[in-house]
Amino acid sequence: MRIIIAGYGNVGRSLHRMLEERRKELLRELSLDAMVVAVVDRGGAAVHWRGIPYGKLAEAKDRHGTVARAERHGRPGVGVLEVLEEVGADVYVDTTLPNFEDGQPSISYMERALIRGMHVVTSNKAPLALAMPALLEIAGYKGVKLLYSGTVGGGTPFLSLASRSLRGNRIRAVRGVLNGTANYVLYRMEVSGVSLGEALEEARRLGYAEADPSLDVGGMDAAAKLVILTNHATGSRYTLRDVRYSGIEGVGPRELSDAAGRGRALRLIADSGELRVGLDEIDVRSPLNVPANLNAVEFDVEELGSVYLIGRGAGGPETAAAILRDMAELSS
Ligand SMILES: NC(=O)c1ccc[n+]([C@@H]2O[C@H](COP(=O)([O-])OP(=O)(O)OC[C@H]3O[C@@H](n4cnc5c(N)ncnc54)[C@H](OP(=O)(O)O)[C@@H]3O)[C@@H](O)[C@H]2O)c1
């Protein structure tokens, strides 16, 4: 499997390292013979048809800030579209940054890859949140797959619980905590009485927050995940424009301790029934009242009632592990 990776930050880099470190195991256990033939960041590309070693790219990135300065393989100024045209590959992996205005340039990258007959695996949620129905249609038309396990829940398999473990059951709705940073901020304000700004700074220091934390705090990130999870679990075809969302701004330790006094907790809840993300008061004993940066989803299943899954929602290696699961699916 020949792979092009766009984005060489936390996720892209972790993925490249894992593919190399676990090469033998992936081949033996999953028949996944993975070779990274191109990597692209904002400085340009590194390309080699026989595969690029992780150490070489990591060194170029650390030393020069871009993979395009890698010895022999570096191609400064060469972008994703050129690489997709010039480099033969089976899979395009998008780990670039989300743009929730119009999903670009990633929507164009994914469309180009699909049209050229490549499978697409993404951890970038913006293109899916804004254009999931159209992208799935192109993939279906071209007979390739569009997989996105890393977009919701980092490594925790919320999406595959819906599509695999609950296959054959009818999922009526999904509801839950889909943004670990917002949850961490609420939790810290609740248990330690710190301000929203202080809690957010802690989250940033711990590496939980998105590059642009207003996406976490303002509810947009959770809204994007709600679109992806709802479409995946229920077969609907929503986009971000269909979701009403608000965030956790304006809440302080006072509101959280008042709620606690009533046996309630304030959580940023995404709900597919109302297609809404917003602050909700939930019972302190609810499984959705998770601590720290955890995510939690309740699947309302016709045959089973409520099924819950709780786990860590983000992290570079965790998200790279989700991308690996998608690759394993492609090779099976
Ligand atoms: N980290 C997580 O826990 C997590 C979890 C789930 C989903 N995600 C999503 O996964 C994606 C990657 O996250 P991350 O944490 O790895 O971000 P990151 O560390 O900021 O890395 C982003 C990478 O994308 C590159 N990039 C941006 N625009 C590009 C373009 N037009 N062409 C080529 N490369 C481009 C950047 O290049 P430069 O290095 O040159 O700046 C950088 O290497 C994001 O969409 C994020 O929302 C992340």
Image: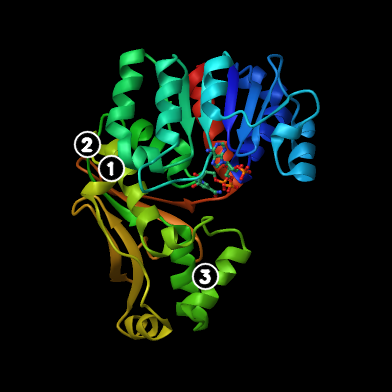
Question: Which amino acid type is shown beneath numbered disc 2?
Answer: Ser
Give the number of the mark in front: 3 or 2. Answer: 3
Which label is found at residue 230?
A: 1
Give the number of the mark in front: 1 or 3. Answer: 3
- In the rendered view, tell whether residue 29 sits above or below residue 243: above
- In the rendered view, tell whether residue 40 sits above or below residue 158: above
Q: Quadrant of the N terminus?
A: top right
Residue carrying label 3: 200
Residue carrying label 2: 236
Instruction: Report if the CB atoms under discs 2 and 1 are less than 8 Å apart.
Output: yes
Q: CA distance from mark 1 to mark 3?
A: 28 Å
- Give the residue drawn at x 41%, y 20%: 114
Q: CA distance from mark 2 to mark 1?
A: 7 Å
Q: Is residue 11 left or right of residue 256?
A: right
Q: Quadrant of residue 140?
A: top left
- Give the residue drawn at x 73%, y 40%: 61
Q: Quadrant of residue 168?
A: top left
Instruction: Report if the CB atoms under discs 3 and 2 are less than 8 Å apart.
Output: no
Q: Secondary structure at mark 3?
A: helix
Q: Quadrant of residue 304?
A: top left
Which label is found at residue 296?
A: none
Q: Quadrant of ligand 1?
A: top right
Q: Nearer the viewer, residue 102 or 33?
A: 102
Instruction: Report if the CB atoms under discs 1 and 3 are less than 8 Å apart.
Output: no
Ranked by sequence position, the earlier of labels 3 and 2 is 3
Q: Nearer the viewer, residue 133 or 84?
A: 84
**Image location (x, y in percent) of residue 249:** 37, 72
Q: Residues within 10 Å of mark 2 (few under 14, many from 20)?
A: few
Q: Secondary structure at mark 1?
A: helix
Q: CA distance from mark 3 to mark 2?
A: 34 Å
Q: Residues within 10 Å of mark 1 (few under 14, many from 20)?
A: many
- Give the residue drawn at x 58%, y 24%: 4
